[in-house]
């Protein structure tokens, strides 16, 4: 792999930028691999990278029906955090945060990681109490977190309406300094380039249309639009398409698919240094490097595979934004886009083995899959390589819905809409 460095930039500048190599190859599929990963998003690519790096398994193919990162990886609002309190979630997302911190160096690719910190607002004294509990649990796990009072908050976010006459008066916030944003495309491209350099075949425009099984039920390979490919280990990392791809193997999952929409405003001069999450509804905002305010809210309230939201949700999300920042009403909305979320019944992911020998699952990420990317790749690589779930994801197994060991971060009952 041609290493990216300041020296390389300088050298290429002197030679008219003619010496750059392709970031990854475009190989034809081989008839057989040691493992196949379906889905060329961040999770599939990270899994391939860690399989090669941590487990010495490079005879691996990542099959992507479109282009790398064209799914939810390239559609999300790029936010990362690890402010969880449920045992299992806490350790997993903390591991992800640790990996994020060294990722650009590890991949030799600038993922534009910005630890700008996230404030989650409290709109009542009771909500502040809940955050106090959350902060104590996080501190107990060694995660850096602060409770912020009103005066400090208005100094750190001057544009926020902290007046008593605000539509939803603010009482303070919980702040995680390491939370922030990462350039999502760069994550997909960085993992792809590093996996390719270790020998993984990344095959785009290759849709998996069938999962083949032996008479005893174990997986033997996949059918694709570029022909059959054999392997006795197949990992699924297809986010919003999880139910459909699992159906190819006859596996039904406790999942719903909903559209989630994100929005970006016209570019503004710097107005917001941090990520701010509204506490009286599901809504959050940050400012991108280009100046646009990037924001999002809740999923649509009905199941769908249509990657576009509806106007009532736009109104709902924009109203929440203006409740926090009433000085923004004349800012123009530049564009919005949607992605299909694979929502579980308890808001936590589904990862690990399946009842079908040789078939492994990485899905059910709900709102939190981007921040999970490095740890999900790390743990899924272990699972595919060894055939047993990594200890950090044992709690995410499918069987939790049989045994009742559900993992609800925000207890709401079996209602994907509310997690
Ligand atoms: C609008 C929006 C905002 C979000 N914001 C955040 C956020 O701020 N923070 C956060 O942590 N998470 C966020 N998420 C969730 C996050 O984006 C996803 O959970 C995460 O990106 C999933 O990554 P992935 O690699 O599993 O899936 P994807 O990136 O969707 O990759 C799956 C790939 O599988 C491919 N595929 C599907 N079917 C097949 C097939 N049959 N054959 C071959 N390939 C197939 C798809 O083309 C796709 O490229 C957001 C999601 C959306 C939609």
Image (cartoon, rainbow, N blue to C red):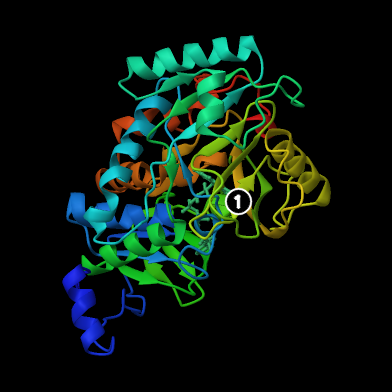
Question: Which picture quadrant has residue 8?
Answer: bottom left
Image quadrant containing the N terminus = bottom left
| Residue wearing tag 1 | 293
x%, y% of residue 284?
61, 39
x%, y% of residue 285?
59, 43
- Which residue corresponds to the image point at 31% horizontal and 74% vertical from the top-left? 23
Decide if residue 406 is on the left or right side of residue 375.
right
x%, y% of residue 74?
52, 59
**For this rendering, which residue is in front, 343 or 320?**
320
Decide if residue 174 is on the left or right side of residue 379.
right
Decide: is 330 above or below 134.
below
Is residue 392 visible to the viewer in this orientation of the structure?
Answer: yes
- Which residue corresponds to the image point at 54% horizontal and 60% vertical from the top-left? 71
Circle 1 crowding by C-alpha within 10 Å: few under 14, some 14–19, many from 20: many
Decide: is 156 above or below 107.
above
x%, y% of residue 415?
68, 29
- Which residue corresponds to the image point at 25% horizontal and 58% vertical from the top-left? 107
Q: Residue reaching furthest right?
A: 312
Query: How many numbered dots are placed on residues in this image?
Result: 1
Question: Which picture quadrant has residue 94?
Answer: top left
């Amino acid at each position: 792999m041609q290493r990216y460095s300041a020296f390389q930039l300088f050298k290429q500048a002197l030679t008219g930028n003619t010496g750059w190599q392709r970031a990854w190859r475009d190989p034809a599929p081989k008839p057989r691999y040691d493992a196949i990963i379906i889905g060329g998003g961040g999770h599939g690519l990270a899994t391939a990278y860690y399989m090669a790096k941590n487990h010495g398994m490079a005879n691996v193919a990542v099959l992507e029906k479109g282009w790398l990162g064209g799914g939810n990886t390239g559609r999300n609002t790029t936010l990362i955090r690890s402010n969880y309190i449920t045992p299992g979630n806490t350790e997993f997302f903390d591991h992800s945060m640790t990996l994020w911190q060294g990722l650009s160096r590890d991949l030799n690719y600038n993922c534009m990681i910005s630890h700008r910190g996230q404030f989650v607002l409290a709109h009542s004294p009771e909500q502040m109490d809940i955050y106090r509990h959350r902060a104590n649990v996080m501190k107990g796990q060694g995660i850096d977190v602060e409770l912020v009072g009103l005066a400090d908050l208005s100094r750190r976010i001057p544009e926020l309406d902290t007046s008593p006459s605000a539509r939803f008066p603010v009482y303070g916030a919980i702040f995680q300094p390491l939370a922030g944003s990462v350039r999502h495309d760069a994550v997909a491209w960085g993992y792809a380039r590093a996996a390719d350099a270790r020998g993984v075949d990344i095959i785009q425009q290759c849709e998996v249309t069938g999962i083949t099984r032996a008479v005893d039920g174990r997986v033997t390979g996949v059918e694709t639009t570029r022909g059959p490919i054999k392997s006795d280990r197949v990992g699924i990392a297809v986010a919003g398409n999880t139910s459909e791809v699992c159906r190819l193997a006859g596996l039904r999952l406790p999942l719903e698919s909903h559209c989630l929409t994100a929005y970006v405003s016209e570019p503004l001069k710097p107005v917001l240094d941090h990520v701010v999450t509204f506490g009286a509804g599901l809504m959050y905002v940050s400012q991108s490097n280009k100046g646009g305010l990037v924001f999002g809210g809740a999923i649509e309230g009905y199941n769908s595979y249509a990657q576009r939201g509806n106007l009532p949700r736009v109104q709902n999300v924009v109203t929440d934004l203006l409740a926090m920042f009433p000085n923004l009403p004349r800012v123009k909305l530049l564009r919005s886009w949607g992605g299909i979320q694979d929502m579980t019944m308890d808001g936590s992911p589904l990862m690990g083995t399946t009842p079908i020998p040789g078939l492994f699952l990485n899905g059910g990420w709900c709102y939190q899959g981007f921040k999970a990317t490095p740890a999900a790749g790390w743990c899924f690589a272990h699972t595919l390589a060894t055939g047993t779930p990594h200890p950090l994801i044992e709690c995410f197994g499918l069987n939790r819905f049989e045994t009742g060991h559900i993992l609800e971060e925000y207890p709401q009952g079996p209602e994907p809409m509310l997690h």
